[in-house]
Image: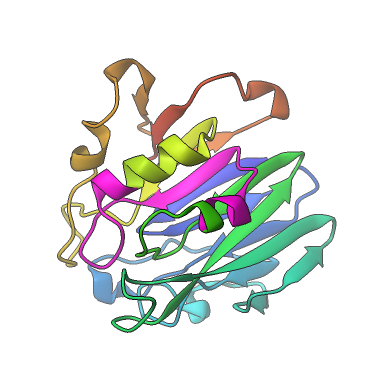
Amino acid sequence: MKIEYLGHSCFKLTESTGTSIVCDPYSEEIGYRMPNVSADAVTISHGHYDHNAIKNVGGNPKIIETQTSYSLAGVEVDAVKSFHDGRRGKLRGENTIFKFRMDGIDVCHLGDLGEECSSALIEAVLPVNVLLIPVGGNYTIDADMAKEYVDRIMPEIVIPMHYRTKDCKLDIDKVDEFLKLFDEDIVEEYEENSLELLRSDLNDGTRILVLRKN
C-alpha cells in the first residue's frame, strides 16, 4: 500500500489494487492549499473546515462520515466514535476515528481526537500497524497525550499530523514537541511526502516517520 501525506491531517491511502481513500481534506483557510487529488472515497472525521473540504477531492468519491463499517472494492473501513475534546464533546463535539485494512496492513486515522487515553478506546481501535495521530494540541490531544496513545497502542509505524508548519495559520504546536519525547534512533524525517509499505516491512518495535507535504 501507499501512504501520501497531503498536509495537516489529510492523507491519501492507496491499496495495491488501486483503490484509494482520502482522509480529512482541508480548506485553504488553514494557510495553504491541498494538492490536486482524486479518490474512490473520502472519510471525514468531523465537520470543521480543516477536515471536511470534500470539494477539494476529485473523482466523484463516496463520502464516509458516520460510525459504521464499509467494504470498498476489498478495502475494509471501520469507524469508531470518539470526542474532539476532553469533556465528552461538550466543547467541540464528536470525532470519528477511521480504520482501514489495506494489503493486510491495519491503518488508523485518529482525526481530531481530543479525549484522554482510555482502555475502552484503545480496545476499540486495536489492532493498529500504522497510526496517523494528531500531536499539535489546543484543538486535539497534545504531544504528551499523543505519546501515551503511541505507548499503549504500540503500532509499528507512527506518522504525526495536525501540527504547525511555517504556512499553517492554526494555533497549534510544531511537530518537534512530539518528536523530542522519543529516542532519536526511532525517529525518521523524510524529505518526501509518501512511502510504500508491504506487510513484511512491519518489524518489531515502533518507528516515528515524519512525512513532508510537497
Q: Residue 160: name its quadrant.
A: top left
Q: Is residue 44 above or below residue 179?
A: below
* Residue 142 belongs to magenta span: yes
Number of labels in the image equals 0
214 in magenta: no
The colour mode here is: rainbow
- Most distant residue in the top direction: 185
Name the side, left or right, on which 167 lies relative to 119.
left
Question: Is residue 139 rendered to the left or right of residue 53?
Answer: left
Picture residue at 75% right of the left edge, 69% below the top = 69
Q: Is residue 168 left or right of residue 98?
A: left
Report the span colored magenta: 121-145
What residue sits 64% from the left and 61% below the top? 21
Name the residue rendered at 47%, 48% in the picture. 132
Q: Is residue 42 above or below residue 185?
A: below
Q: Quadrant of the N terminus?
A: top right
* Residue at the front extreme of this rendering: 119
Q: Is residue 167 visible?
A: yes
Q: Position of residue 172 (x, y in %)?
A: 18, 60
Please give the name of the residue rendered at 63% of the width and 23% of the height, measured from the top-left corner. 201
In the depicted structure, whether residue 59 falls above or below residue 9: below
* Image location of residue 121, percent across then percent down: 53, 58
Where's residue 55, x and y in %? 50, 81
Q: Nearer the viewer, residue 141 or 209?
A: 141
Picture coordinates of residue 192 (x, y %)? 41, 36
Does residue 214 appear in this view?
no
Q: Is residue 141 above or below residue 4?
A: below
Q: Residue furthest right?
A: 74
